[in-house]
Amino acid sequence: MVDVEYLPYQKIIVHEVRKMDIADLLSFVAAQVEAQKTGATAVVTWVDGVAFVTGEFLPSPQTIEETLKGRIHYSVVMFSETSFQAEKRVTWNGREYSIKLNRGESNPNFAALAKFLKNYKP
């Protein structure tokens, strides 16, 4: 029989925080979707009044080692305080984009990050 071990992350380390108004955050996300040319629907995580996106470091031996030690490193977290709507619209570069807000409160990492962001003072 195989043993199963659950090893949750122990720490989230954020290297840069950018608080933005909601229109700027959504415009940034729309620009990223447009730059990637995937046609995918843009998604922003939302928890307890905070909408946010995270920027990840590229995988490297160091970042993989940190992850295996239970530490998540985000290069940047951009966020805005806003009410929940399943979808928000923004006009960027002359086009209208639909950005979905994904409720993330069931993820303990996202809940902890949103709590940190709500109290963040630059």
Image (spheres, grey):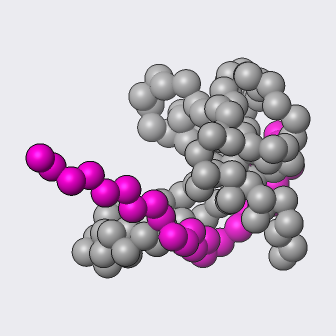
Where residue 51 sits, quadrant-wise, is top right
Query: From what the image shows, is residue 55 above or below residue 99?
Result: below
Q: Nearer the viewer, residue 101 or 68?
A: 68
Q: Is residue 25 left or right of residue 66?
A: right
Residue at x 80%, y 25% (from the top left corner) = 85
Closer to the camera in the image, 6 or 46: 6
Q: Is residue 75 visible?
A: no
What residue is rendered at 65% in x and 32% in y?
102
Q: Is residue 32 left or right of residue 20?
A: left
- Image vertical order of residue 61 relative to residue 8, above or below: below
Q: Is residue 59 left or right of residue 9?
A: left
At a point 73% along the width and 22% down the height, the residue shown is 87
Give whichever of 7, 66 is nearer the camera: 7
> From which residue to which does the magenta span run?
1-25
Question: In the image, residue 107 lies at what x, y percent?
Answer: 59, 45
User: Is residue 108 located in the magenta-colored stretch of the structure?
Assistant: no
The residue most toward the front is 1
Residue 32: percent from the left, percent from the top? Answer: 56, 42
Is residue 16 a member of the stretch shown in magenta? yes
The outermost residue toward the left is: 1
Quarter holding the C terminus is bottom right
Q: Is residue 48 visible?
A: yes
Q: What residue do we see at 50% from left, 39% from top?
A: 35
